[in-house]
Amino acid sequence: MEIHDNEKISQRALLVAVDTGEYDAEASMAELYELAETAGAEVLSHVIQKRDAVKVSTCVGSGCLDEIEQYCRSNEIDLLIFDRELTPIQIRNIEDKTDVRVIDRTMLILDIFAQRAKSKEGKLQVELAQLKYMLPRLTGKGTAMSRLGGGIGTRGPGETKLETDKRHIRAKMEKIKERLKETENHREQLKKRRRKDGVITVAIVGYTNVGKSTLMNYLTDAGVLAQDKLFATLDPTSRALRLPSGVSVMLIDTVGLVRRLPHHLVEAFKSTLEEAAQADIILNVCDVSSSEASMHLEITRDLLESLGCSGSPIIPVLNKCDLVTGIDDIPLIGRGVRISAKNGAGIDELLKAIEDNLPIRIKSGRWLLPFDKAGLAAEIRRGGSVLSERYTENGLEIEAQVDELMYEKLKNYQS
């Protein structure tokens, strides 16, 4: 075991991981650093112990735990963050040994979620996830505390505090689910209205901290929080985007993903991700300056498929090309587009890729509209791209790009 000091930051949190070979421990630890700092923790050092298996009682081995205890005492560490989900027994044993508060990866992510959720639905989803995580971790003092266990000494007039707590938590979870159902129904009505009105949706999805919100801001000036922090966006943001052809689409920014995201956290935010999965076009954004860009794209695609995303075109978007020398030398991934949401490089190509994948076809034409058909001219300007227009003695001569529905409506006025 080796403890790696970070001398630039003299802080008070120690990160701990056990490397059993089931995943890339170093890469996961690097992400844990970002998670911890995003949550506001001050990271001093990290520990990675190689083991064949996690120790049931304390996660790490006894020798490693002795070193952690000594390091915490010498450096006034007041928080241990483990890069995996711990059992209540493991947390209790580690805290008893080190006299330092212990949290695990899931608790850390939930804390970030709680800090960053802004909408009513986002806050409810966070609370539900927290309660789901807490419920199985409520522990009593064995079966003697349970009146359901039967036998001498277990019968009594009322519930134990443990059972009362569990009952309250379950009741609260049901209330939250009911409130979430109401917000989901409201969102479903909005979706139906969009479909009825012919609104095309384009979802921005991808690994967390790859620049999704920066891209959203660049395209639509949405003012979405764009920071170099994980989970900067927890609530979906929708903004209108007018494409060069004149077609308007609804752009949706979504919560970012992380590796090894616990299943119940995915479930908690499933409605947010389902909104992306149901989009007409999906922009799968990755940080091309990361050595794990291909893996991040694959993680996102797999999750979308698990949510039933099928049929919608997925465009890989290779962002942060400004951090890589030679934008044209960066290999494309699939039908990917190279961009920099920071300085706008490649945005024209991205917009073209969106237009090429629209569920409607864009047609060009020239029409002569009588003066009493000014409403048609207004529709063209509003929903299409006007190339030229000129008033003549017989009416308005207009050349434009329009969708198929509008093209059909104008067939009697072709010039």
Image (cartoon, helix red, strand yellow):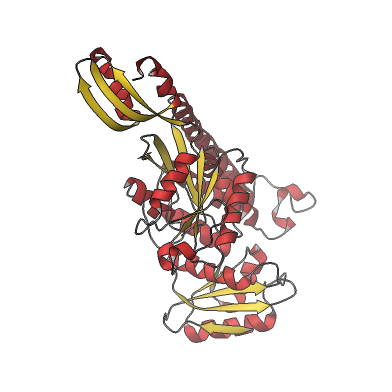
Residue 366 figure quarter? top left
In this view, 42 is above or below 203: below
Image spot of residue 289 (x, y percent): 48, 66
Residue at point 45% right, 50% down? 234
- The one nearer the camera, 171 or 339, is 339
Asked if residue 6 shows in the view, the reply is yes
In this view, 155 is above or below 380: below
Residue at point 66% right, 58% down? 140
**Badge count:** 0
Image spot of residue 258 (x, y percent): 55, 58
Image spot of residue 128 (x, y percent): 54, 46
Q: Is residue 237 left or right of residue 271?
A: left
- The one nearer the camera, 20 or 205, is 205
Residue at point 44% right, 43% down? 252
Q: Is residue 311 left or right of residue 318?
A: right
Q: Quadrant of the N terminus?
A: bottom right
Residue 345 figure quarter? bottom left
Asked if residue 134 shows in the view, the reply is no
Q: Quadrant of the C terminus?
A: top left
- The one nearer the camera, 41 or 322, is 322
In this view, 34 is above or below 109: below
Instruction: Identify the residue at the far right of this view.
Output: 151
Image spot of residue 35 (x, y percent): 49, 65
